[in-house]
Amino acid sequence: MKPRWLSHLLVCFMVLVGGLSDLSRAESRKSVLVIESYHTAYQWDADYTRAINDQLSGSTDLTFVQLDTKRRPPSEYVASAEKAWQHYLELQPDLVILGDDNALKYLGPRLADTDTPVVYLGINNNPRNYFQNRPSNISGVLERPLIKRSIVYMSSIMEQRFHKVLVLLDDGTTSKTVYAEVFGGESHRSIGLVDVDVRLIGDYREWQQAILTAPTLGYDAIMIGLYHTITDADGKHVSEQQVITWSSAQAQRPLFGFWSFVVGSDMAIGGYVLDGYEQGKLAAMMAKRVLAGEPLPLLPITSSEGQFVFSRSQLSKWQIDLPQDVANQSTFVP
């Protein structure tokens, strides 16, 4: 029989070892700061942050900060970025993830002067445009909207009804980049056999007018890009949900989209779209490798694969029957 003092000693030893083990596990966890260009209610952000949580929450401590540059005016971007920078200084994270162009534009140059590895996602512009010299501690995932491919696919689905298309974009940073990169800054292009007109609109009344006059101007369909920085006559932000639901209800021509968040029962019919979850997953997987000790890739990667996503109710409303090969590849939402 063991003396009582020896049993107490063994218990204390086990508690000490357990405590040291817990401390070791706590110290081994890495901290990651995610700086979002936009806001948590924006579906794109919700999708990619969900992917980051799925990939990293079990092994890292995640902190999320939003710049909210979809709803705030450009005059507030610098102040919003400064607050995010203060979060960085206080947290001193092991790695930073930057979501979308505004986060990279306003915080990338500062982070390039640190030793912190940085992974970006959702970048439409050329990342080099944000730096004087290519930083060795920053890389990530480029976002290249599949606009031309989506227009060609949708025109084949609509067959003879799809000859002239109106593409609507808001006047935000991403839209301006898409306009420059995809359309070469030209308001009229031919893509395949389709004549395409592109409009960047920041005013809600002008957006509504574009939707309502589409039939009289000869458009067979409307392709909705981004609609998140639109303001009313008083300069106040109009919620993205209001814009898209009004557009869907009032449009006399079918609406298609380029991003998955535009598709729904009271939104657009669908399209060959990009998905925020895939962007977040690729960025998180890169971050995971870097935190495990692998070097940050010198060159960014591109998420080039889209997916067919369609709303069943919108397909029914517009009496569109998908070709069987497209239906077999598609994800359907209500």
Image: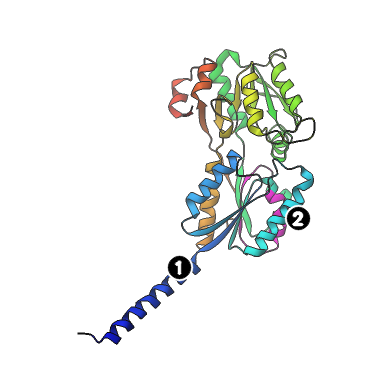
Q: Tell me if label 1 and label 2 are in contact, CB under 8 Å.
A: no
Q: Residue at x 51, y 30 (%)?
A: 308
Q: Is residue 57 above or below residue 251?
A: below
* Towards the viewer: 182 or 24: 24
Magenta stretch containing residue 124, yes or no?
yes
> Residue 116, how many percent across, how many down?
63, 62
Image quadrant in which you'd find residue 11: bottom left
- Answer with left or right where residue 49 lies relative to residue 101: left
Mark 2 residue type: Gln
Q: Which residue is mark 2?
A: 132
Q: Along the polypeptide, which appears first: circle 1 or circle 2?
A: 1
Calculate the distance from the C-alpha at mark 1 to the C-alpha at mark 2: 40 Å
Secondary structure beneath dot 1 equals helix
- Which stretch did the figure color magenta? 103-125
* Towards the viewer: 130 or 104: 104
Mark 1 residue type: Arg
Q: Residue furthest left?
A: 1
Q: Residue at x 55, y 50 (%)?
A: 283
Secondary structure beneath dot 2 equals loop
Q: Is residue 215 above or below residue 135?
A: above
Q: Nearer the viewer, mark 1 or mark 2?
A: 1
Q: Which residue is mark 1?
A: 25
* Residue 298 shows in this picture: no
> Residue 227, how many percent across, how many down?
67, 32
